[in-house]
Image (spheres, rainbow, N blue to C red):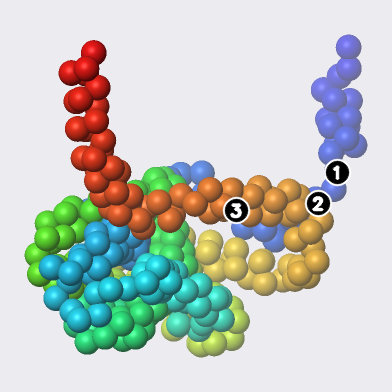
Amino acid sequence: MASKGERDVEIHVSSPPPDDRDAARPLLPAACEAYSVSAAILPFFFPALGGLLYGYDIGATSGATISLKSPTSSGTAWYDLSSVQTGLVVSGSLYGALIGSATAFTIADFLGRRRELVVSSIMYLIGALLTAVTPNFLIMVVGRFLYGIGIGLAMHAAPMYIAETAPSQIRGMLISLKEFFIVLGMLLGYIVGNLFVEVISGWRYMYAASAPICVIMGIGMCWLPCSPRWLLLCATQGKGDLRETKENATRCLCRLRGQASPDLVSEQVNLILEELSYVGEEKKAGFSEIFQGKCLKAMIIGCGLVFFQQVTGQPSVLYYAATIFQRVLDSLEHLMPLVYQFFLAC
């Protein structure tokens, strides 16, 4: 049986020497972050409204296409839209979302998550109002496009703001709830569409109904503090005085954590700063590295999930759900007399 000293030697020899870079890596505290539940609600709620407005657009557009093309309830002289024109009304927001998403990658770090969401709410509001008061088809498509830019910006900034400001214990839950808000928005859009589908110019009310939510989102994001992590990221990139930025980040995090101790908040800010400093020292990965090793596997899984979700046509069904059900019911109305006669004959 080996003596205590021998065991110590064996352990020492078998353990690899610590790497300097590993020693520089900040260690997260074992204790959970202190936070106030009430203080965590609004930093989640206002960004999540961006997802709700996206879902609302899907549901409202489903009913708006029926109202817009109705000779009796359209309220316009250009109600007789072709299939291509109807498709432009529906997909106008998607084209805008494509541009908004591409733009977000170039302006996100410059604007910051909070200001990006403020810009998103403005685009939402302009797009909704322009679509609601449009005098012709062309202006309507422009309004749909601007609304779509708001979607692209919000879908980029909202999960980032929530992830960077939410306490670690509930971070995953809040990000998932943001997706729930999208579905909730769809339901709200279908309900509003059902209420106004037979009203003259009802499609205008459907799109205008989202304007108050846009205003609430914009005001709420102006009131919320900046992401402390984004502030510290700017400081590590030399875009501001480090001491002043650190104090600002501490104040922002105190607001986000509510009743948390200032000492604990200051310690967390230091940890974030150390982590960002360490990340900044790492070798930057080239574009080709996403096609290698574990990155390739992750990219295939992520892109595959999105591809198969879209290629099934599921989003199109949501946008045209009201039209699909309307045609099914019309077919059933013509079919029911035949079914009734069949049973009488039997």
Residue 197 visible in the displayed image: yes
Front tag of 2 and 3: 3
Three-letter amino acid code at the position of disc 2: Gly
What residue is shown with label 2? 293
| 134 or 287: nearer the viewer | 134
What element does badge 3 sit on?
A: helix
Q: CA distance from mark 1 to mark 3?
A: 44 Å
Which residue is depicted at the point 50% across and 78% down?
A: 99
* Rendered residue at 20%/25% (across/down): 341
How would you rate the neighbour count of disc 1 (Cα within 10 Å): few for under 14, some for 14-19, many for 20 or more?
A: few
Q: Quadrant of residue 32?
A: top left
Q: Amino acid at mark 3?
A: Phe
Q: Position of residue 201 (x, y in %)?
A: 14, 72
In front: 143, or 159? 143
Under tag 2, what secondary structure?
Answer: helix
Taking the image as shown, residue 3 lies to the left or right of residue 201, namely right
Name the secondary structure under disc 1.
loop
| Residue found 16% across the figure and 60% down from its top | 197
- List x then y, in percent, for residue 29: 52, 49
Question: In this rendering, would 152 be left or right of 36?
Answer: right
Left or right of residue 58, residue 171 in this image: right
Answer whether labels 1 and 3 touch (C-beta < 8 Å): no
Mark 2 or mark 1: name the one nearer the start of the chain. Answer: 1
Q: Which residue in the rendered view is the most extreme toward the front? A: 345
Q: Amino acid at mark 1?
A: Pro
2 vs 1, front mark: 2
**Residue 307 disc label:** 3
Q: Is residue 218 above or below residue 259?
A: below
| Badge 2 or badge 3: first in the primary sequence | 2
- Per the image, the residue denoted by label 1 is 16
Query: Which of the two residues, 26 or 238, is positioned nearer the viewer here?
Result: 238
